Image (cartoon, grey):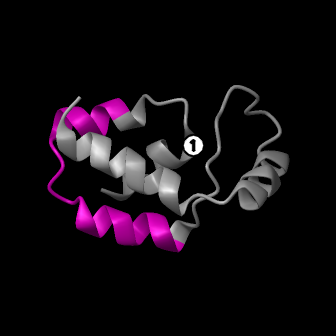
Amino acid sequence: MTTELIKLKSELRKKGDRAKAENIRKFFKNSQSDIFLGVTAARIRNLAKDFYDLHLQDVLKLMKSNTHDERSIAHAI
């Protein structure tokens, strides 16, 4: 895992909101194994702009993640 990927994951966790994560979990009822951090779509888009040059292999790792927010930012990048 590259340092950029570690920084991105750290930023996602900092921007997460537990209350929002619980509400999102209720919406995605069929995603029992997914982990939700509660990061808003606007924050995900802003972070994606900061990490637009993330290495392709790291983006692919994010796409395979069991964390919903990590997959979302991978698609935004």
Q: Is residue 1 above or below residue 69?
A: above
Residue 58 part of the magenta-drawn span: yes
Crowd rating for badge 1 (residues with CA inside 10 Å; few <14, some 14–19, many 20+): many
Which quadrant does the C terminus fall into?
bottom left
The amino acid marked with disc number 1 is His
Left/right of residue 54 with respect to residue 71 in the rendered view: left
Reply above or below: 22 against 39. above
Residue 8 point in image, percent of width and height: 33, 50
Up/down of 70 relative to 1, above or below: below
Residue denoted by label 1: 68
In x, y percent, where is residue 3? 19, 40
Using residue 74 as the reference point, say whether residue 23 is left or right of it. right
Q: Position of residue 26 (x, y in %)?
A: 85, 48
Residue drawn at (58%, 58%), measured in percent from left and top?
A: 16
Q: Mostly what secondary structure, the magenta segment? A: helix
Q: Does residue 74 appear anywhere in the picture?
A: no
Assign a secondary structure to mark 1. Answer: helix
Q: Nearer the viewer, residue 19 or 66?
A: 19
Residue 61 in view here: yes
Q: Which residues are magenta?
A: 42-61
